Image: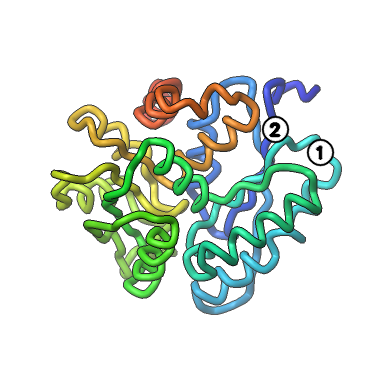
Amino acid sequence: MIEYARKGLIGVLTPQANTTVEPELSILLPPGYAFLNARMVSEKPTMEGRLGDYFSTMGSCLSQFANAPVGAFAFACTGASYLEGAERERAAVEAIEAAQGVRFLTAGRAVAEALHRIGARRVALVSPYPPALTKASVAYWEGHGQKIVAVATAFNAASDFHPIYSLPESAARDAQAGIDIAGVDAVVLLGTGMPTLGPILAHTRDSDVPILSCMSALAWQALAVFDPDLAEESAMRRYFAGEGWRERYDRAMS
């Protein structure tokens, strides 16, 4: 037993400069769960090059956790999944799980599973990416059977140290406000680097259309490994609407 992870310990792989994964997971995980974080590194000068490195080293990066009693691994990087595609991602995940004997979750596949479970087929996206990566994300979701009916962008090339990680919550909220959600089954806030929890909570106060982010989906699927009841649709919908973590968010932001 791990004192601060009596219900479950999660091993998380995070891109090297990402400033969002750990704070959001700290809010999204309830008491009794904990995570260990390992940073994926790359010296490639372009975002696409770094994403390729992260994908190719997913399995080897797990050695950073040594023999810690991790019950699930979580790959908190959706951009790599978009560039590699759903089929290559599936094959890589299956190979890693066979080698590790532990569930290996990716943020992209977690979103796809969540959308499937709530019966969403017409999806609107809020993207923090430049145009080429946004286009790749649309192809990825279509590869999972979704029809992308709207895309809003929060990308800002002039952001401080990184065009995604330095975005404020208002970037996602403002981009999302431009989406006509009539006829939309779900809204997905893309990326693990754009802050999303505040915009999610604001949306749920005003709309019944489900909204999730790559981080909320990844946290949900990791928790469901330990608590299968959370995979039930009603419990999942309540979790995505903020049940159990809304108060932690309010405390963190006060």
Q: Quadrant of the C terminus?
A: top left
Q: What residue is rendered at 52% in x and 62% in y? A: 86
Residue displayed at 58% across by 30% down: 224
> Distance of mark 1 from mark 2, alpha carbons?
9 Å
Closer to the N terminus: mark 1 or mark 2? 2
Q: Position of residue 106 (x, y in %)?
A: 57, 51
Instruction: Tell me the crowding category of disc 1: few under 14, some 14 to 19, or many 20 or more residues within 10 angstroms, Cα based.
Output: few
Q: Which residue is mark 1?
A: 68
Q: Is residue 142 above or below residue 109?
A: below
Which residue does the numbered mark 2 point to in the structure image? 9
Q: Tell me the number on the disc at residue 120.
A: none
Residue type (three-letter) at the residue carrying disc 2: Leu
Residue 174 position within the rendered picture, expressed as x and y whole percent measured from the top left: 20, 50
Q: Quadrant of the N terminus?
A: top right
Q: Is residue 241 left or right of residue 206?
A: right
Q: Secondary structure at mark 1?
A: loop
